Amino acid sequence: MMLNSAWWDPMAELARFQREMNRLMDAFCQSSDLFPRVNAWADDNTVVVRAEVPGVDPASLKVSVASDVLTLEGERSEATPPNLREAHRQERAARTFSRSLRLPWEVEEGQVKAVQKNGVLTVTLPRRESTKPRPIAVTAE
């Protein structure tokens, strides 16, 4: 902590601390380590999650939902071309993955749909009726 007898700005100190924490967290968990990368959108009735899963066989994908948590699991395999022994560059690794996302509400597990097309997995999750807001009539006395 920098303490100057003339002036000390605690907000500047807090901003410096936040920059340092962000730098440390970026080094610890880079977004490139997250696989699959996902986007999620919601309206009042449905959540749609899209995940990039290039090179993943749809048969190896496992999509599950419990209450308000969606889990995507699978395996991305990388076949080595025949007659080649040495990799010149290898940025795509064969690996298993598991990614869980908390959804904004509980969903109807029996109505979840998952479709993979062109390396993108789209999961559509309808909102559970019991979690939808209901109007309450106000009476005068």
Image (cartoon, rainbow, N blue to C red):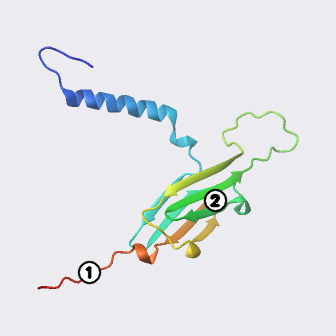
Hey, which quadrant is residue 139 in on the image? bottom left
- What residue appears at the point 67 percent right and 43 percent down from the top-left corner? 92
Q: Residue furthest front?
A: 141
Q: Earlier in the sequence, mark 2 or mark 1?
A: 2
Question: Which mark is nearer the camera, 2 or 1?
Answer: 1
Q: Is residue 75 above or below residue 12?
A: below
Q: Residue furthest right?
A: 83
* Residue 19 rendering spot, x and y as whole percentages: 35, 31
Is residue 33 rendered to the left or right of residue 88? left
Q: Is residue 128 above or below residue 24?
A: below
Quarter containing the C terminus: bottom left
Hey, which quadrant is residue 84 in on the image? top right
Are there few (<14), some (14-19), or many (20+) residues within 10 Å of tag 2? some
Marker disc for residue 136 = 1
- What residue appears at the point 70 percent right and 35 percent down from the top-left corner? 89
Mark 2 residue type? Gly
Residue closest to the eye, 104 or 75:
104
Mark 1 residue type? Ile
* Residue 72 rendering spot, x and y as whole percentages: 60, 57
Is residue 14 rendered to the left or right of residue 27? left
- What residue appears at the point 32 percent right and 79 percent down from the top-left corner? 134
Residue carrying label 2: 119
Are there few (<14), some (14-19), or many (20+) residues within 10 Å of tag 1? few
